[in-house]
Image (cartoon, grey):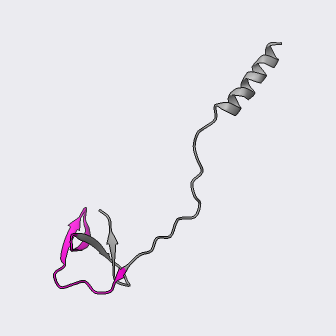
Amino acid sequence: MKTIFYTITLIFSMLFFNSCATRVQSRPVRKTVTVIKVAPKNHRVVHVKGKKYYKWNNTHYRKTKKGFVVVRL
């Protein structure tokens, strides 16, 4: 009788006390990115944590092969 009770308790705990974790999307969501071909004349070069960024209009940009991309710091 004790073994049946322990078995039922084990099954109950496995069903109702499982993890509350949710699945993560396996595919990243694509965001639209605006690429600026040429930096304006009034841009400034800023170094943040050893990396080089370009700043104008209170926005930071990172240089890529195709141009400049907005970066959130």
Percent coordinates x, y for residue 20 in the rendering: 58, 39
- Bounds of the magenta segment: 35-58
Q: Quadrant of residue 26?
A: bottom right
Q: Quadrant of residue 13?
A: top right
Left or right: 58, with 14 as reference point: left
What residue sits 57% from the left and 58% below the top? 25
Q: Quadrant of residue 4?
A: top right
Q: Is residue 48 magenta?
A: yes
Total marks shown come to: 0
- Image quadrant where one finds the N terminus: top right
Percent coordinates x, y for residue 28 in the rendering: 53, 65
Left or right: 50, with 9 as reference point: left
Left or right: 48, with 35 as reference point: left
Percent coordinates x, y for residue 58 in the rendering: 21, 69
- Image quadrant where one finds the C terminus: bottom left
What residue sits 19% from the left and 79% below the top? 43
Percent coordinates x, y for residue 65 in the rendering: 37, 83
What residue sits 72% from the left and 27% below the top? 12
Q: Is residue 16 magenta?
A: no
Left or right: 68, with 2 as reference point: left
Q: Say which of 64 and 72 sits in front.
A: 72
- In the rendered image of this protein, does residue 34 appear above or below residue 10? below
- In the rendered image of this protein, does residue 19 appear above or below residue 64? above
